[in-house]
Every structure is written in structure tokens, then in C-alpha cells.
Amino acid sequence: MREEKSRPGNAGGELDTLFEGLREECAAPPSAPGFLAGFRARRDAWRERTDQAATWRLLALRLSPVGALAAGAALVMTLSSGTQPLAPETVPEAPVTAEYPDPFVAGLEEAGLATVSMNDEDAGYELLAVLYEPMGTR
Amino acid sequence: MPAQKASDRESTRGSTGVSEDVELVRRASAGDSGAFEALVLRYETPLRKLLYGYVLDWEVAEDVAQDAFLLAYRKLGNLGEAAAFKSWLYRIAINRAHDELRRSARWGRRLDRNVGEEALAELPAAGAESAVESRLLRRALVRELARLPKSQRTAVVLKDVVGMKYVEIAECLGCPIGTAQIRVHRGRQKLRRRLGEPGSKAGGGTR
């Protein structure tokens, strides 16, 4: 397919002009001196959460099935305690598809209790299944 | 030695960049945090530019870019070919940008609220009116972009805002080049129809 070039004066020309303006806006990003520090903070917070989740999982594996359920519930409480309450307008429309990385889902995944897959077509992430292992029976 | 063509120089620079990526990804996968931070520094600006094309807000673009880097850091083990790091990272960032747009119902309202005051604050007094108008038109374009199907919107943004070649877009989207071209073409067609209706201002198209 040939590269599309629009004639000046028509709708396509106007579109090209608009895109040119948008490209100019994009071409001059403000400096972001705190970018790396911001990334480090997020990474460290994630590592800490992962460590906590691993501890809970290890504990759950050593407990009886009933104890494992209790530990799982405690894990869920721990993970969800870090989430901010959603403002009414941010409540997801379709509860089947989870926004990711949602701290709760991320925690489940990190604890090995859920499988999350990226869904390219839907631009999101889908919680495929929550697989509660028969913990404590090993 | 004959003068090197600009395209050759670009190609050489590109392949050097890829080989540096491969080395950094290899080290990062082995647990070298510094190597991943080098990748962050390398792609921070291009990623923010890409995301600005989606969200039209530098702060949000920075936030989404950091999120995308974190996801890439966590999922680095899933990256098949180290050489594909750039397109993989861009794909993650695009998905995150779509998540952000979908989640943020206030996005449209923020655009509407900011456009007047931002434009007036940033632009010189002389010709401010026409500058504001052109900025408003660009907002209208972004709003119409947001109404396109995801596949077309992504292709158009990568082509017309980021300035990627079709081959790069295809890599980014994980589709054949022909598919990328068709998506760009159809997306532009829709935008032209919506923005170029006779007798209607760019922002007025509601179809």
C-alpha cells in the first residue's frame, strides 16, 4: 500500500495538519528527573509485597487444610488492605475482566493462587482462573 | 571511504541499539538491577512520548510509563527474544494506556477542563485565539482517536503521532505489515469522515 498523502485544503489535509500539531506537542516532553526514582520506588514496593506473599504461602503450605483456608483468607485480607477504595466512576464495568496490575490480583498471582493472562484484543488482562491448591495436603 | 547514506547510518545505529538491548536484557534477566535501570533510562523518553499521544497529559504519561516498566521488569522472563525488547515494552505500554483510558472515565472531562486554561497559560498573547483554536482541534482529534477501535487507534497513533514505519508498527502489534497498513488506512478514513464533515467543526462530529 502506498503511503497516503492528503491534498491540502481537504479533510485529509486538515487531518495531516492536526497530526503535525500533535507530533510537535509530543516531540517536546518536559524533563522527568524523578522518573528513575519513581520506577525504583514502585519496584521496591512490589518486591516487598512479593516477599510478604511468599511468606504467607509458605505458612499456608505448612498448615492443615482448614488452617490453609484461614491463612488464605488472611492473605487476601493483607493484599486487599493495600488497595485504595474505588471512586464510583472508576468501578469496572465488567467484573469478569480484572484490571491488571490490580494489587489484589497481582498478589494472588504472585502467591501462585491465580493465573492472569494478557488479552491483547481487549487491551487488558483477564483473570483466567483462581486455582486454590490443596494446601496442607502435601 | 564513500559518504555513508543517512538511511545506512540510521540502520547501523538501530542495530547497535538492538545489540545493546540484548546485552542489557541478558544481564537484567540474570538479576542485574542496574542493567534494567539502564533500559529504563534508554526508553523513558520515547515511551513517554508514545503515551502522551494516547493520554495527552505528561503526568499521566509518566505514571503509565513507570507502570509499564514495572510490568516489564516483573515479566522479563516471559520475553522470548531479547532483541524484541523494544516492541514488547511498547506493547505493554500501549495496553497499559488503554487500561488507563478505560478506567479513567474522567479522562474526557479532564481534557475539556484543562484545554482552555492550559492553552492560554502556555501560549503568547499575540495570536492566542488561533493557537487556542488549533489546540482545541487537536483535542478533538485525540477525542476522535479514542473512539476508534483499539486496533485502528493503536496503529494510527504509532504511525501518525509517534512516526513509526509500518514494519515497526507490525512488530509492535505482532501482526503482518499488510494488516498494520490496513488498520492505519481504515483509522484515518474514519477520522477524516468524522473531522471533515462539511459544515461541522472538528470537535462537533458525534458519529
Image: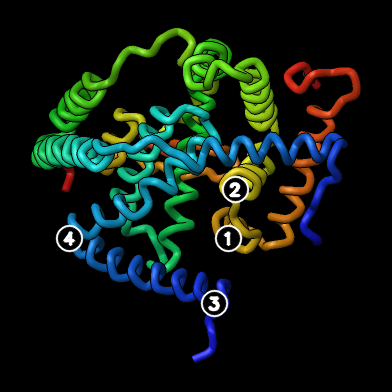
Amino acid type at mark 3: Asp
Residues under labels 4 and 1: Cα distance?
28 Å
Q: Is residue B167 left or right of residue A38?
A: right
Circles 2 and 1, Cβ within 8 Å, touching? The answer is yes
Residues under labels 3 and 4: Cα distance?
33 Å
Q: Residue at x 26, y 56 (%)?
A: B38
Amino acid type at mark 1: Glu
Q: Which residue is more in the foreground, A137 or A8? A: A8
Q: For mark 2, name the chain.
A: B
Q: For mark 3, name the chain.
A: B
Report the residue marked by disc 4.
Answer: B32
Q: For mark 1, name the chain.
A: B
Figure quadrant of the C terminus of chain B: top right
Amino acid type at mark 4: Asp
- What mark, if any, has residue B8 been given in the picture? 3
**Foreground mark, 2 or 3?**
3
Residues under labels 2 and 3: Cα distance?
23 Å
Q: How would you rate the neighbour count of disc 2 (Cα within 10 Å): few for under 14, some for 14-19, many for 20 or more?
A: many
Q: Residue at x 73, y 19 (%)?
A: B203
Residues under labels 1 and 3: Cα distance?
17 Å
Q: Looking at the picture, do discs 4 and 1 lie on one chain? A: yes
Q: How would you rate the neighbour count of disc 4 (Cα within 10 Å): few for under 14, some for 14-19, many for 20 or more?
A: few
The relative height of residue B143 versus residue B121 in the rendered view (above or below) is: below
Circles 4 and 1, Cβ within 8 Å, touching? The answer is no
Give residue A33's quadrant in the image: top left
Report the residue marked by disc 2.
Answer: B158
Q: Which residue is more in the foreground, A133 or A17? A: A17
Q: Residue at x 43, y 38 (%)?
A: A29
